[in-house]
Amino acid sequence: MYEAQVTGGSTLQVEFTKEKGVRIAGAPDAQIQKLGADRWHVLHKNKSYEISLIEVDEASSKVRLRVNTKYIEVSLKSDRQLLLEKMGLSSLSVKKVSDVKAPMPGLVVRCMVEVDQAVEQGDALLVLEAMKMENIIKSPTSGVISQIVVKQAEAVEKNQLLIKFK
């Protein structure tokens, strides 16, 4: 069982089973038919909805869906996550990240952020070239950039400090 919260909308209890497929608590009369790997047709209260899965962000437990022609974002929480929150333990799994280090030796090709810029988890910070391949270094957390330690065209070593967060 999952709790699904639509951004700016309602919260639903959703269950996924192999036998019954997808079931929505509070809407037992909803008829859900799987159309493909990432597509469903839902008939509820004489209204028809075609739902397509657009993107899954496992790190933030969010999915992006298209419902007919409208795009929505849904946050999913498992029974386990809800229990941890209820017990006040959910914050234990959140790790505060204060800096970004080079995952490999390489050359800084482009820096895509500035000091005092707010970034979200997953935003591109800089491009690091290693072994003739460009690697986009993404933010491991949401925060504000306090210092950019490297400059464009600078060679860096593995685990060298690149960016600091406030």
Image (cartoon, grey):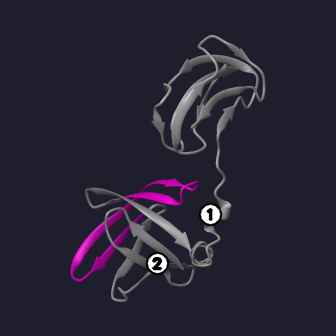
> Which residue lies most toward the top here?
153
Q: Quadrant of residue 78?
A: bottom right
Do the residues bearing badges 2 and 1 touch, measured as CB atoms within 8 Å? no
Q: Amino acid at mark 2?
A: Val
Q: Amino acid at mark 1?
A: Ser
Residue shown at 64% from the left, 40% from the top: 98
Q: Residue 63's spot in the image, x, y percent? A: 46, 59
Tell me if 148 is positioned left or right of 15 in this view: right
Badge 1: residue crowd in 10 Å (few <14, some 14–19, many ≥20) = few
- The magenta region covers 39-65
Label of residue 91 in the image: 1
> Which residue lies most toward the right here?
158
Element type at mark 2: strand
Relative height, residue 55 to residue 140 (above, below)? below
Instruction: Check residue 68 for magenta coloring.
Output: no
> Which residue lies most toward the left here?
46
Quote the CA–CA distance across marks 2 and 1: 24 Å
Q: Residue 73's spot in the image, x, y percent? A: 39, 58
Label of residue 20 in the image: none
Instruction: Name the chief secondary structure element in magenta.
Output: strand
Q: Would you name the residue on which mark 2 appears? A: 14
Judging depth in this view, the residue of 72 and 66 nearest the camera is 72
Give the quarter of the figure containing the C terminus.
Answer: top right
Residue shown at 61% from the left, 15% from the top: 151
Tell me if 123 is positioned left or right of 41 in this view: right
Instruction: Check residue 42 for magenta coloring.
Output: yes
Give the quarter of the figure containing the N terminus.
Answer: bottom right
